[in-house]
Image (cartoon, grey):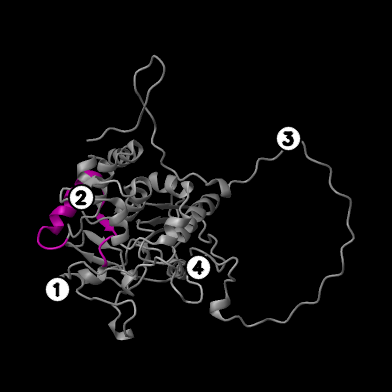
Amino acid sequence: MVEGSMTQGAGLGPERTETLRDFRVPPYAQAPAHSAQVPPPPPPVEMPPPAQPRPPVAVHPAEAYPADIHPGNAFADDEPPEGYTPTARDLPVINRGDTVQVRVQTDPAPAPLPDGLGPLYVVGDVHGYLDELLAALREQGLIDVDANWAAGNARLWFLGDFTDRGPDGIGVIDLVMRLSAEAAAAGGYCKALMGNHELLLIGAKRFGDTPVNSGAGTATFQAAWLLNGGQKADMDRLQDVHLQWMSRLDAIEQEDGHLLMHSDTTAYLEYGDSIEAVNDTVHALLTRNDADECWDLFRKFTKRFAFRDDGGPQAARELLSAYGGQRVVHGHSPIPYLLGEVGTEDGEEDSRPVVEGPHVYADGLAIAMDGGVTMAGKLLVVQLPLHD
């Protein structure tokens, strides 16, 4: 196991530094400090008479967010930007007959929990589909019409994979960073886990075309990023604040008996025997900035389908036994593939995969949350526990 990050002082032995758990408010969201001296109030200004109220104007839904304030997709005049690559559908189709799909209750959120915590929500893979994310968050009452946090002390967890395949991954990251600050100010929180596409984007930016030991010939992060839907527009807009934020994401957490993770794999067990140990190890690997180590981490977090078939329930129990909780909640593997339904991004309406809610399987021990938005499925934002 890889040890946590260390610091070395003058004449001192190594000292373990405390892992940063909470999301820090980004610089652009911080309020300026008040000066010790308060200037005298300005002289009164005579105000003009109030303007007469204007009649209401009907607004088309497409005009509800002006271009200068709407954090929407980056396609101008419906034309994809240069370097846009469509979704590659290269996953095997798993046609299972012993799984059940849950229709999620969309009633208003219940009253806060007795200990003061608000309701718990999780978000599946977004992959740059910012408009779909905004619509799903509004539908659950988590944001208002201006995309501001509107859920008080609610708790919101993103399961990773913010970028690639879709048109505005950086816009998604900016939204999540801003909502984390607004939710904290309202008594709730908005947090996120690290997905394999965060590792891929970090690697593509840090290491580019540097060869890595893939175990199957020469590979590079840059080539893998492009092959897996990397968008030039995202790379052009990627800033240090985005890289720092992604690098500090935890890999696994537990909330209300739900073991939250991105990938449906047992590879997490290779990085620690507790939630804290796994997160410390992942943070330490990214801090060391070794291309081969980061590639191995990406490769293992890309594994999938650990909870399907006959060995699925036992694999889920191994994770729950090690890290706690009653159910594994994951993204990564799209529900349409698990159900044997394949959709297209530009096909007929009746070819769209039917995804109404999360997918519960592995004897009820696993919940899949990737609704397949990249294949015209559904971006899922649901409240836990499920009403099944």
Q: Secondary structure at mark 3?
A: loop
Label 3: few (<14), some (14–19) or many (≥20) C-alpha neighbours in 10 Å: few
Q: Secondary structure at mark 4?
A: loop
Amino acid tagged 4:
Gly
Say which residue label 3 marks: 36
Label 4: few (<14), some (14–19) or many (≥20) C-alpha neighbours in 10 Å: some
Which of the two labelled residues, at mark 3 and mark 1, occupies the earlier sequence position? 3
Q: Tell which tag, 2 or 3, sits nearer the viewer.
A: 2
Residue 218: image tag:
2
Q: How many marks?
A: 4
Say which residue label 1 marks: 97
Which of the two labelled residues, at mark 2 and mark 4, occupies the earlier sequence position? 4
Q: Which residues are magenta?
A: 308-334
Residue 118 among magenta residues: no
At x 59% / y 71%, what residue is drawn? Answer: 66
Q: Secondary structure at mark 1?
A: loop
Classify the position of the N terminus by image quarter: top left
Label 1: few (<14), some (14–19) or many (≥20) C-alpha neighbours in 10 Å: few
Say which residue label 4 marks: 72
Q: Relative to 352, is 265 above or below?
A: above
Which of the two labelled residues, at mark 2 and mark 3, occupies the earlier sequence position? 3
Q: Is residue 273 left or right of residue 22?
A: left
Label 2: few (<14), some (14–19) or many (≥20) C-alpha neighbours in 10 Å: few
